[in-house]
Every structure is written in C-alpha cells, then in structure tokens.
Amino acid sequence: MAETERRRRRPPISCVLCRRRKIRCNRESPCSNCVRSKNASCIYENHFLQPQQATELHSSISPIAEVAVPSLTSKSSPRAASTTTASTAATYQSSQDIEFLKNKIKQLEERLSQSNETSQSPIQTPGSNIEAISSRIGGTFYVHHEDPLAGQPQNISRSVTHKSRMFGQSHWITGMALVRDILNLIEPHVHEDTCKILTLMVKSKSLARTIKSQRTPRWPSLLKTDLPSKDIADELVDRYLQTTETIYRIIHIPSFKKDYEAHWTSQAEPNTAFLVQLKLVLAIGATTYDDKFTLRSSAMQWVYEAQTWISEPGFKHRLNLQFLQNNILLLIAREFVDVGPDLVWISAGTLVRIAVYMGLHKDPTRLPKVSTFTAEMRRRLWNTILEISLQLSLISGGPPFISVDMFNTEPPGNFDDEQLALEDPPPKPESYFTQTSIAIILRKIFPARLSIVKFLNNHGSSGTFKETLQLDAELRASYKAVLRTLQGYKSTTGSQPSKFAMDVVSLLMNRYCLSLHIPFFAPAMDEAAYAFSRKVVVETSLKIWRGIFPSPLTPVSQSYPDTVLPSQHYLARLVVCASGFFRISPLQASVLIASELMGQLREEETFGPGLVRQDLLSIVSEAKTWAWKCIEAGETSIKGYFLASLHAAQIEGLMQGLEKEELSRFVVKEGEEAEEKCFPLLEEMLSRINPEGSTGAPEQTTPSQMVEDWDLTMSDALFDFGETELVNWGFDENYQGLSFN
C-alpha cells in the first residue's frame, strides 16, 4: 500500500502574538489586536512565506505604510498586490525574489515600529477617524474625530477614549489635543538620562497613592453618632445653607434647623436618616470652611458612612422624601469631597429612576391630593434632580438620558420656606426674591442647556457649525430674560440673591456656552470661518476666571483681603478645596487661555509682531498660583501645577524668541523645577496624616499607572475594595480572551 502523502504544515500568516492567543489576526502591521494591547511591536514569522501569502500580507501592510512612511511606497516598496499574472507568480517562486520580499517586509515593519514608538504626531488608523495621541507623560488618548461631511472641519473632536472610559465633547479632556504641542516639545527629552521629569512624576504619584490610602476610610464604614463640636457644626451648617442650598433646593430649612437643635438637646437615640443627612450637610459645608480644607479627613469619613447606609439592600421602606434628599446630598458630597467624583454621573442615573419610581416626574396636581408643603417639596426635589443630572452629564461628557417630554412636573413655586408651614399659602410674585428664586431661574434655562448637552454628547449628533450658532442664540436669549429678572431683584428693597448665588449662575451659563464652542476652537486657529467660536471661547474663559477670582492672584498676597466680606470667599474656596464641576471650570478656562496665547504668538511669526493680550497673560501666571493652592488644600495630583508651569514656560520662551531646541530644554527645565517644588509639599501632607511617620514606603507606581489622574475628575477608585481595577479595552497577553485588568 502506497504511503499516504504527508500534508505540509500551513505557513503562519498571523502575527506571533495572535497565533499564540489563538485569536483572529487582520494581518496589518501592527495588527488591530496589538494596537489595542499597546504592544510596541507586532512580529510576523515569514520563514515559509508563499507567493499568495506574501501578496496578501504585503497588501495589508501597504496602506499603513502609505500613512506612516509614504516615501517607502513611492520608491522602494514592491507592489505585490498588482502581480496577478502567472508569469509574475512564477517569478516569485524563485528564492531570490522571496528573500527580497521578506527583507522589504521586515524593513517596513521596523520602520513602522520606530515611527510608532518615536513620533508624537497623530497616528491615524487607516479607514478610520480615530486618532491616537500618545506620550510617556500623558499616556494614550484616542480622539474620535468628525466624520467627513461637506463644509465641516476634519479635526473636530467628537469624543475621547481613555483607558476604559469614553468621554463626549463637553468633557474637558476632549481638549487634550490642545496640549499636544507641549507633549511633543518635551517628549524627546523624557528618554534622556539627564531628564528627571518622568522619575519625579513617578515618585510623586507613588507618594500620592500612599497619601490617598492613608486618607481613605474603611469600607464599609458603619454610621457613628460622633460629630464635631457644636460651634464647628453650627458654622459648617451655615456654610452649607449660604452656598449649596441657595442653588440646589434640597432641604426645608426650618424643619432641618428644628431637627438639628433637637439632636443636640435630646437624650433619645438619634434618628438614623436625619443623622445621615446632617453628616452630608457638614461634609459639603467643610469645603468652604477654610482655605486649606482642614476638615477633609472628617468630611470623607462622613461621606463613607452615608454611602454605607444608602447602599444597604432592601431599602423599599425608605422610599420617602428624606431618602431622596439624602441621595441628592450624597451625590454633591461625593463630588465636592473627592470620593469617586468621576463616577457620580452613573449614580445620578439611579437617582433619576428612584424619583420616577416615586412619581416625582408627575406634577402633584395629577396625583392624589397632598399638602402644599409636600407638593412643593416634590417639585423642588425633581427640579434639583434634573439640574444635578444635567450638570453631571456636562462635566462627565455623558449623554443626559433625560428629556423635557419625560415629565410634566411644574417648576417650584416662588415660596420662602416659612410659607410652606401655612395652609394653602399663595406664591409670591415673580419679581419678589425668595429662597427658591435661583432654582426657578435655572429651570427656565434648563431646556436650552439640555439641548446643548444632547448636541455635544448624544451618539450620532452631527454637530454642525450652523447648529452651534443656533443653540448659542437660544442660550443667550434664555439668559437675557434671566438677567432682567436678576437685575429686578437688585432694584427692590426686599430680599436679594447673595453674591455667591449670582456668581454661580454666571459660572453655569458661561460653562455651557464655553462647552458649545470648544469643538470649533482648534479649527478656528486655521480657518477664519470659525472665528466667532474662537472669540467666544476666549472671552468666556476670561469671564469664568475673573468671575471666580475678580482680582489677580499672586503667590505672596493674601487669598482674601480683609475688605472682602466672608460670604464672598466661598466660590474662590470652592474651586480650591472641592473637586468636580467647580475645580474643572477654572482648569479648563486656563488651558484654553494658554492655547489662545500660543496661537497668537504663532500668528506673530506669520504676520509680524503684534500685541499679546496682557489680561490673558496674567491668567497664565495666576493658574500656577491657583494650582499650587489646590495642592496646599490637599490635592495629591501635581499634574495641574505641572501643566500650568509648562504652559507658562512655553509662552515665556515663545515671547523670548527661543528656537525649538532651546525652547524645548527651557520648558523641560521648568517642568522639573515644578515637580521638585511639589514633592516636599506631598511629603509634608503625608507627615500630617501620620505624624509619627509609621507609613512605610510609598506605594510603587509604574509609568503606565502614572497617567491615571490627568483627568482631575478621575479618582483612582470609588471605594478601595482591594486591587480591583476598571475593565481595560485591550487584551491580556497571557489570556486568550478579554482582559479584566
């Protein structure tokens, strides 16, 4: 019997890594799986390459080569895909031509690998609109650009993917492309032995992780009855009532004060739900207690205790107005006190569903009859839930998932809290300022702001410039009517809104306007058609900054002069001590102003010397002072101060006319000095947490972990449950499937 012909082993055409994982390879260089896994190289073994496989492999590599190294395809790359005749195929059978093809493919792979590793210019995925911005300092950000449309600029960022999360246009991180110049400027020096930027950043991050671990309360944290002394508690409650409660109506102030006084005098066991509410009020009030947030540790403990109580299963019996109040307060406290502020938007969705489950989306007139007190509290809480949900969608870059047709609840009535204790009280005229007037004003401009957030963050939004101008006009028209109402309050002899409330309303409106025009800010640097957006972004950023800091910040001056009333300190303290919306707003404004100044300096090189705006230049310097104050108040990430220092150095170097290499080294030097300045402050912060020094060595940080807190609303984890981390987009090299690391 003739011996069965032995089958020849099929030559491998997948890359080594895909073949080892036993997953499908698209045979590009690098392949899609290696791109997701962030591998520096993608290796193919072509020892048994046959003509057909050589043609197929080279065809898949050619488009990438045309993007990354176009000179290769025009001069030295063999056009294997066009070899379709039998004679050409026969030629490829010769060992000489096969070796030639193998060498060329190897050269292409090496050149592409070097290009991906060393070039900091955008990496455009073939046939895609996703751009990767990568550096050792900033990590990798995938920017999703505008799909090609007639009349639309191609460099508009529609969203950004970073690690396991995706952010819409309203998230500040979508402006990452604006700091690309600085990253490109310092990146070549990061690899030098003499450069200390990476080393200092890793050390600072390790120290920051140790500080956070020492600060973080135990989980779960059972509710305790202990409180600060009565005089401190009184002041914290007062701070809450003068700030947060003036914007977001949550509690009924007379009822709260009555229960508060009873808590201190009664010998009975305290009401658990009220104790949770009180601790959350104290935690929020602590963010404006002083300039250094000295009660941070206590505030975090109070938030953890409240979170533990609310997280208990089987809370059906708690579905009442006080439970809703506590949930709202918890969201605000988590955002302000920096307990997982980046994930608060997710919890806001749960809160909306609880409110709908309780029927708050239906006006009380359409439900069984209730008292005026109950009806108005339901309207207030639904109004506040809408406001907070929309605001969190704005800062998180997520879709709002709410619409004006999902509810028919009327806005709150124009009542002072004392009126609600009466039977069927009439609301006061609209021209009369009450404790609910600011909430009513925000509700009037809610539809215009909701349209903007949907326009920016909803999936599939085209985001044309024409629509941007239309939404801008609608927002301005709504705000114009609001301003007339606010001006009317000032002309009366009755109650008037506080300066804090007025400043916050202005900040909110400017933030929505700013977010609307930011997508066209970068294109406006090159295309005059979008000059209006550039002007709006610059002037609105200036308004945001000066609305928070009316007078220039200087390192040696007092934060708050004696001539300023204490109530006027609150917003400035909030942007230093709190996290979330109030922290991100000045950060975003300062980055945009720095980008505008660099744009002006570049234009000078083209059109000749011009005037750099001094009002903008002063804010670049003030941004460093503000970022430093944030660290003094307990912020563990030094990257805000580091970035502000880089911006100031680059602008100074450009104004001095430094050449590129000289400018690069100047910026690197300033960055190193900024890091060296911050490190002792972090060490002092750690020593205050553990005066006896029994902290052990700082937690070790790898360069890949170092980029986690570039987005200053992202804390490392909501609660420390151990070593659990968020799901990654990529693949694990040692597991044939999705990675959960």
Image (spheres, grey):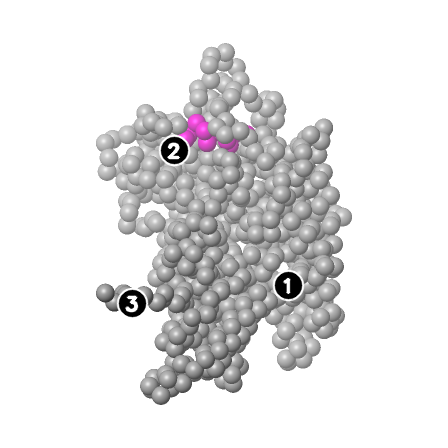
Secondary structure mostly seen in the magenta stretch: helix
- Is residue 500 among the parts visible in the rendering? no
Picture disc at residue 324: 2
Task: Out of 669 and 519, give the one closest to the viewer.
Answer: 669
Q: Earlier in the sequence, mark 2 or mark 3?
A: 3
- The residue furthest front is 1
Circle 2 packing at 10 Å, graded few (<14), some (14-19), many (20+), is many
Q: Residues within 10 Å of mark 3 (few under 14, many from 20)?
A: few
Q: Are marks 2 and 3 in contact (CB under 8 Å)?
A: no
Q: Nearer the viewer, mark 1 or mark 2?
A: 1
Q: Which mark is residue 242?
A: none
User: Is residue 400 in view from this perspective?
Assistant: yes
Q: Is residue 311 above or below residue 466?
A: above
Left or right of 619, for residue 96: left
* Element carrying mark 1: helix
What residue range appears in magenta? 301-311
Q: Secondary structure at mark 2?
A: helix
Q: Earlier in the sequence, mark 3 or mark 1?
A: 3
Q: Nearer the viewer, residue 555 or 645?
A: 645
Mark 3 or 1: the one toward you = 3
In screen coordinates, is 315 left or right of 607?
left
Q: Is residue 308 magenta?
A: yes
Q: Which residue is mark 1?
A: 187
Pointers 3 and 1 in contact (C-beta within 8 Å): no
**What's the residue at 41%, 59% (across, down)?**
19
Q: Position of residue 702 (x, y in %)?
A: 60, 49
Badge 1: few (under 14), some or many (20 or more) residues near its Cα, within 10 Å? many
Residue drawn at point x = 36 percent, y = 40 percent: 350
Rendering coords of residue 160 (x, y %): 46, 58
Query: In the figure, residue 383 lies in which quadrant?
Result: top left
Instruction: Please name the residue that numbered disc 3 is placed on.
Output: 5
Q: Amino acid at mark 3?
A: Glu
